[in-house]
Image: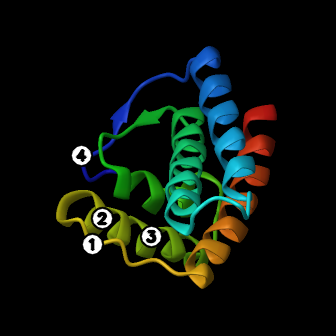
Amino acid sequence: MRIGKLKAEPPAEAELGGLLRSGRRRLVDAERAELSLESRFDLVYNAAHALALTALRAKGYRSESRYLVFQCLQHTIDLPNEQWRVLDQAHRKRNLAEYEGVMDVDEQLVDAMLRVAREVAQRVARLVEE
């Protein structure tokens, strides 16, 4: 966390609670099979980001980079590399959709994101409770 892209900032309880609630709600909504795959992708991506940001903020840091928020999960909640790399892949696909209009997601990616986001939610909840 020495690379200068993280800013030290004490965590705020209200912010942590709001981010955690937002992540959990989006995660529940992302599980709704009747939604389009693209909507589920957006929901689970944003759920994972809110949860990852909760972990970073709980550790006393802030970042403007979505990618870095995911990358820090191995440090904030000890998330294994293979799991945060799923979110890295999702981040690249999200950027293609957002900036180039190319939505290239499939059920397998969304399912993997859901599994990782659930794990992140559990670990973040433990971290916040500490």
Compute the Cα span from label 1 to label 4.
32 Å
Which residue occupies 57% across, 21% down?
Answer: 15
Looking at the image, tell me whether mark 4 or mark 2 is earlier in sequence order: 4
**Quarter of the figure with residue 99:** bottom left
Disc nearest the viewer among 3 and 1: 1
Q: Nearer the viewer, residue 82 or 40?
A: 40
Disc nearest the viewer among 3 and 4: 3
Please state which amino acid type lies under the numbered disc 4: Gly
Please state which amino acid type lies under the numbered disc 1: Val
Looking at the image, tell me whether mark 3 or mark 1 is earlier in sequence order: 3
Dot 1, crowdedness within 10 Å: few (<14), some or many (≥20)? few
Q: Residue 18, image x and y in percent?
A: 62, 24
In the visual, does 102 lie left or right of 88? left
Q: Do callouts 1 and 2 mark residues in contact (Cβ within 8 Å)? A: yes
Q: Residue 120, image x and y in percent?
A: 68, 56
Q: Nearer the viewer, residue 117 or 82?
A: 117
Looking at the image, tell me whether mark 1 or mark 2 is earlier in sequence order: 2
Kindly identify which residue carries mark 2.
Answer: 97
Kindly identify which residue carries mark 3.
Answer: 90
Kindly identify which residue carries mark 4.
Answer: 4
Kindly identify which residue carries mark 1.
Answer: 102
Please state which amino acid type lies under the numbered disc 2: Ala
Compute the Cα span from label 2 to label 3.
10 Å
Q: Residue 105, image x and y in percent?
A: 46, 77
Which residue occupies 33% across, 70% down?
Answer: 92
* Res 73 visible: yes
Dot 2, crowdedness within 10 Å: few (<14), some or many (≥20)? some
Describe the element under mark 4 as helix, strand or loop. loop
Compute the Cα span from label 1 to label 2.
4 Å
Describe the element under mark 2 as helix, strand or loop. helix
